[in-house]
Image: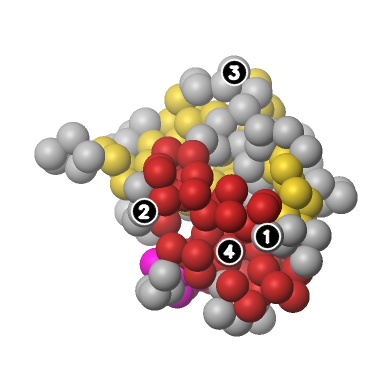
Amino acid sequence: MSAAESFASARSIGHDAWIGAARMSFAEGKEIYAQDEDADLIYRVIRGAVRTSHLLADGRRQIGDFYYEGEVFGLELSSAHRFSAEALTSCEIAMIRRTSPASGRDVQVDRLMWAAAGSELARAQSHMLLLGRTTAAEKVARFLLDVQARCSGDASILPMSRQDMADYLGLTIETVSRMLSRFQSDGLIRFTGARRFNVVRPTSLAASAAF
């Protein structure tokens, strides 16, 4: 199963667990939860996009991942969050407790947690493979294809900044910008706004990603 297929599976499994879940709205740039905060909740993006990141001891930032509508985040094996989560755009987030009294609802939550764990594993493996790509072109092309697979509608959205992309891919912001410009000038993608794009030649973009 591909990472995109795993994400789609996690969206559908455990749907009933979200019925009646608490919801909160977050403005762009607002923190949803902090690094080292108690991890007693599981979150789902209802609207918008979310970024997770980890602040290292030397002040550097490590990007965990990006989450789109329908995707679950915040699942931890330990009692505290290793990463913080921030709203990349205006967001609506659903929240449920990962522990609750034994009931029929617990079965749904357990199924949700298993599905989310599988999705996170696929996400981590996908990121590892992405970072293992030899060239910057391969990394950026693979990233764009992953984003396209996770977005609904004709146009794909890059809610993150170019710096976020660079940190996630282990590249410089100049290199990311250069690769995006190159793919557009070569006719592989077309930007319809600063953060909206269409994949015009998917086979060629996949070839650039060394699939």
The quarter of the picture where the C terminus appears is bottom right
Q: State whether residue 181 is above or below residue 28.
A: below
Disc 3 crowd rating (10 Å Cα; few below 14, some 14-19, many 20+) is: some
Identify the amino acid type marked 2. Leu
Of the residues tagged 4 and 1, which is closer to the observer? 1
Q: Which of marks 2 and 3 is nearer the N terminus?
A: 3
Residue situated in front as seen by the camera: 106 or 159: 159
Q: Residue at 57% across / 73% down in the picture?
A: 209
Mark 1 Cα shell of 10 Å, populated few (<14), some (14-19), many (≥20): few
Q: Distance between the residues labelled 2 and 4?
A: 13 Å
In this view, the residue in front, 96 or 104, is: 96
How many angstroms separate mark 3 from mark 4 (CA)? 30 Å
Q: Is label 3 in contact with label 4 (beta carbons under 8 Å)?
A: no
Task: Give the structural element (helix, strand or loop) at label 1.
Answer: loop
Q: Is mark 4 on a helix, strand or loop?
A: helix
Q: Which residue is drawn at 87% across and 50% down?
A: 154
**Mark 2 to mark 3: distance in Å?**
28 Å
Q: In the image, is 73 to the left or to the right of 58? A: right
Vertical position of residue 40 compared to residue 152: above or below: above
Single out the mark in the foreground, 2 or 3.
2
Mark linked to residue 171: 2
Q: Residue furthest right?
A: 154
Residue, disc 1: 186
Whether 162 is among the magenta residues is no
Residue 156: image location, x then y, percent: 74, 48
Position of 15 compared to 25: left or right? Answer: right
Q: Is residue 79 visible?
A: no
For disc 3, the marked residue is 27
**Residue bounds of the magenta highlight:** 126-131
The quadrant in which residue 206 appears is bottom right
Return the disc, 3 or 4, that comes first in the chain's sequence: 3
Q: Distance between the residues labelled 3 and 1?
A: 36 Å
